[in-house]
Amino acid sequence: MEKITIAIDGFSSTGKSTIAKQLANKLKYIYVDTGAMYRAVTLYAMNHNLISKGQFKKNELINNLNKIHISFKFNSQLGFAEVYLNNMNVEHKIRTIEVSELVSEIAKVSEVRKKLVEQQQEMGKNKGVVMDGRDIGTVVFPNAELKLFMNASVETRAQRRYDELLKRGDKVTFEEILKNVKYRDHVDSTRLDSPLIKAKDAIEIDNSELTLNEQFEKIDKLVQEKLRNV
């Protein structure tokens, strides 16, 4: 069966990576979490004192982009690929609220986006890939056979993120998570370079009231229909 490219875009905490992993696992496709790539760059900038609340040494980050190497290595025990920054596993470190508060600023930098988009396009050049992010269907793979745009109410998304961080043991409040989600929505949607918008041919999925199983069944039907018509 001929392989396709599946592009999944949407706001933060809409379950993009969850459905992407499920689809990639069923189809035996490559899964790429592009948001994790931007988080890895953010972590690098934080570790090198290039960004913090109130200060951002953007030009220094740009000059150091050639020192940032991001890769994915499959963890058979977890069932998905973890993120490595310069050969160090940073899967847990990039998911913190501290990184979440700064990643949208990093993602606004055109030079960062150019570097990562080139890597993403290389990863998916042979199709058979499920990729999620903010600009996959509009910039990275505008010709993807199937484009999805994930959405949910801001309160639902904040609650999901809050529950996820609490489960990991992070000390956060719902109010700061809600504030962060709203802030990231604004920055992602209004940035000049590759803003978060729904591609004209994308299918919007509002999963505010859907269970994970209901969501997967709904999207899997779309995938199977697309595969039959390739």
Image: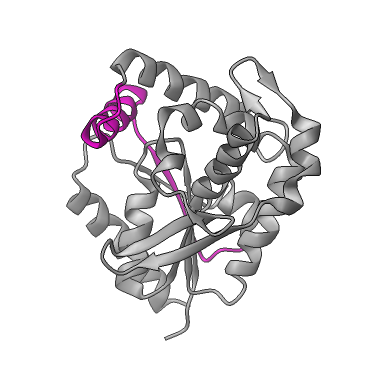
Residue 126 position by quadrant: bottom right
Residue 72: where, in percent of width, then height? 49, 62
Which residue shows up at 55% across the image and 23% down it?
Answer: 186
Report whether 29 appears left or right of 123: left
Is-magenta flag for residue 163? yes
Residue toward you, 75 or 113? 75
Outermost residue to the bottom: 1
As displayed, is residue 146 above or below residue 11? below
Assign the N terminus to one quadrant of the image: bottom left
Residue 189 location (% of width, % of height): 58, 30
Residue numbers of the magenta segment: 143-171
Q: Nearer the viewer, residue 137 or 58?
A: 58
Q: Nearer the viewer, residue 110 or 201?
A: 110
Q: Is residue 195 left or right of residue 153?
A: right
Please check the rendered image and state whether residue 183 is part of the magenta-colored stretch, yes or no.
Answer: no
**Camera sees residue 196:** no
Image coordinates of residue 220 in percent, x first then y, are: 30, 63
**Taking the image as drawn, is residue 49 in sight?**
yes
Total numbered labels placed on residues in the image:
0
Q: Is residue 124 above or below residue 60?
A: below
110 left or right of 165 in image: right
Seen at 27% across and 32% down, the residue is 160
Q: Residue at x 72, y 36 (%)?
A: 109
How does the figure colour the protein chain or chains?
one colour
x, y percentage for residue 87?
Answer: 54, 59
Relative to 74, 66 lies left or right: right
